Image (cartoon, rainbow, N blue to C red):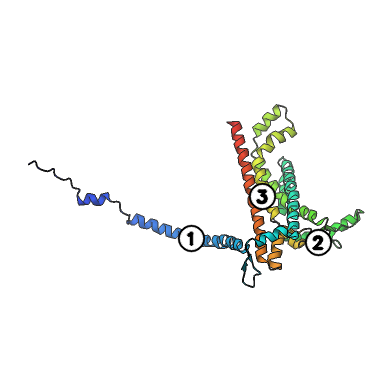
Amino acid sequence: MPSLPTPITIADGAKERSIPRRSTGPWYTRRRQEATTAWAFISPAVLIIIGLSVVPVVWSLLLSFQADDLVTPSVWVGLDNYRALAEDPNFGQAVRNTLLYTAMYVPLSMGLGLALALVLNRPVKLVGLYRTLIFVPFVISPTAQGTLFSFILDPEFGAANSVLHALGVSPQGFLTDPAQALLVLVGITLWSGTGFCVVVYLAALQDVSPSLIEAARLDGAGRVRLLRHITLPTLAPVSVFLVLWQTINALQVFDLVYVTTKGGPLGATTVIVYFIWEQAFKNFSAGYGAAAAYVLALALLVIGVGLRVVRGRERRRIEGATS
């Protein structure tokens, strides 16, 4: 009878080495200590972010589906708050005022900012002083701006009407005139907000290739063609950013309205954010105010996504043209 083959065996030590084990050496212990220390440092920031951003967003979303006066227990009403907004003439007026304010402020601030940036990008004497003077109003808080211009534009004792009287012009109502109040607010915001556009455009103008401009000049291009075919295309990404930034700021204007007009006269300056504050903290309709806030949030989301899509298409078009 033939003998059976000898079975192949693995030594016990080899078995132990072939089975992966969780490291328990000093290196692993050190890594766990570092991870624990890192989480100990960042956990306060994480808790603050969750407590001040995530929780309020979720809570306000739930609140928009409730009838809540901040005193008595809330009642779930579903989409009733949103239906009421669609039929509320005051909300419609606030939306119209906000859109009109945005439509005037955004292009004017960008146009003035670009014009001033082109002027200040040249070797002008005392150019640093001019840049500083233009940017200083931007760092002044809207509350301080509103207080300052409330005194200047006072219909009876303001300096503006005193100057107009000296020029032979009849006194103006300014912030107390329903036909002028929103335009005056746009002018005040331009005084402060244009400086930001100037700084951004000045930084972008530094990236315009001097060799490209010199080549265009050698080909006979004038200032208008240089601006149209070289400068403006180079500034396109910055312009998209400014459109988004200025639009968001315009849709969220509140401080200046609260300090100067408080939504008046006759609702002529009631914007969306002021309407939200008025409903939630003046009329004690927190659920209704939260619904209006989410309408604004949805509008901002649509604007942001739309500009991103437009910018993506423009980038793909440029890449396709250069490839």
The kind of residue on which mark 2 rests is Leu
Q: Is residue 108 visible?
A: yes
- Counting from the top left corner in percent of width and height, residue 37 is at 44, 60
Q: Secondary structure at mark 1?
A: helix
Which callout, 1 or 2, points at the residue further toward the start of the chain?
1
- Counting from the top left corner in percent of width and height, residue 95 is at 73, 55
**242 or 164, nearer to the observer:** 242
Residue at the disc numbered 1: 41
Residue visible at 43% across and 60% down in the picture = 36
Disc 3 vs disc 1: Cβ atoms closer than 8 Å?
Answer: no
Q: Is residue 189 left or right of residue 65?
A: right
Q: Which mark is residue 290?
A: none
Residue at the disc numbered 3: 245
Pick the quarter of the image with the N terminus: top left
Q: Residue furthest bottom?
A: 72
Q: Badge 3 local density, few (<14 within 10 Å), some, or many (20+)?
A: some
Disc 2 vs disc 3: Cβ atoms closer than 8 Å?
Answer: no
Relative to 260, residue 305 above or below: above
Q: Secondary structure at mark 3?
A: helix
Which callout, 2 or 3, points at the residue further toward the start of the chain?
3
Marks 1 and 2, how far apart in space?
52 Å
The kind of residue on which mark 3 rests is Trp
Marks 3 and 1, how far apart in space?
33 Å
Which callout, 3 or 1, points at the residue further toward the start of the chain?
1
Relative to 69, residue 42 above or below: above
Marks 2 and 3, how far apart in space?
29 Å
Task: Tell which tag, 1 or 2, sits nearer the viewer.
Answer: 2
The kind of residue on which mark 1 rests is Phe
Q: Which mark is residue 266?
A: 2
